[in-house]
Image (cartoon, helix red, strand yellow):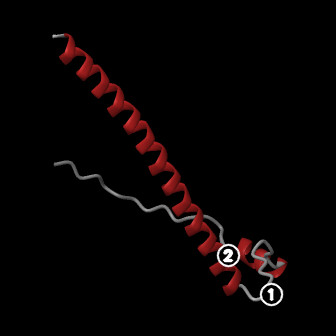
Amino acid sequence: MGFIFKFLLIAIALSWIFSKLLQFFVKSKLKQFVDHANDLKREDDRRRKPPGANVNVDHIPKEYEQKRSMEIKGGDYIDYEEVKE
């Protein structure tokens, strides 16, 4: 009886240690993969962007803004009837 108990205790301890080591190695390999993919993406973005390219999307010309404010007066009310089944 003592042999079976010791065997089970050692087997459980070894399996727990093995699972923790496996988790560590899988996480480290996954982190390496993610870092490599991010490096590739960063390199691809750097190659695609021409040097000196400057895109400014925060600026709205004043003429367009004034024209747009005159066009939009409010919405039309649409009367509808709710159908219940």
Residue under numbered circle 2: 71
Q: CA distance from mark 2 to mark 1?
A: 39 Å
**Who is closer to the viewer here, 77 or 30?**
30
Residue 80, image quadrant: bottom left
Residue at the spot x=80%, y=82% of the render?
Answer: 54
Residue 44, image quadrant: bottom right
Give the percent coordinates (x, y) of residue 47.
68, 85
Q: Which label number is shown at residue 51?
A: 1
Give the percent coordinates (x, y) of residue 82.
29, 52
Is the residue 82 above or below the residue 9 in the image?
below
Give the percent coordinates (x, y) of residue 5.
22, 15
Q: How many marks?
A: 2
Residue 67, image quadrant: bottom right
Q: Is residue 49 left or right of residue 27?
A: right
Q: Residue furthest bottom?
A: 50
Q: Are marks 2 and 1 in contact (CB under 8 Å)?
A: no
Give the percent coordinates (x, y) of residue 53.
79, 85
Q: Is residue 34 left or right of residue 85?
A: right
**Who is closer to the viewer here, 83 or 46?**
46
The secondary element bearing badge 2 is classed as helix
**Amino acid type of the residue that numbered disc 1 sits on in the rendered structure:** Pro
Marked residue nearer the N-terminal end (2 or 1): 1
Question: Nearer the observer, disc 2 or disc 1?
Answer: 1
**Amino acid type of the residue that numbered disc 2 sits on in the rendered structure:** Glu
**Who is closer to the viewer here, 65 or 24?**
24
Q: Residue furthest top?
A: 1
**Who is closer to the viewer here, 39 or 79?**
39
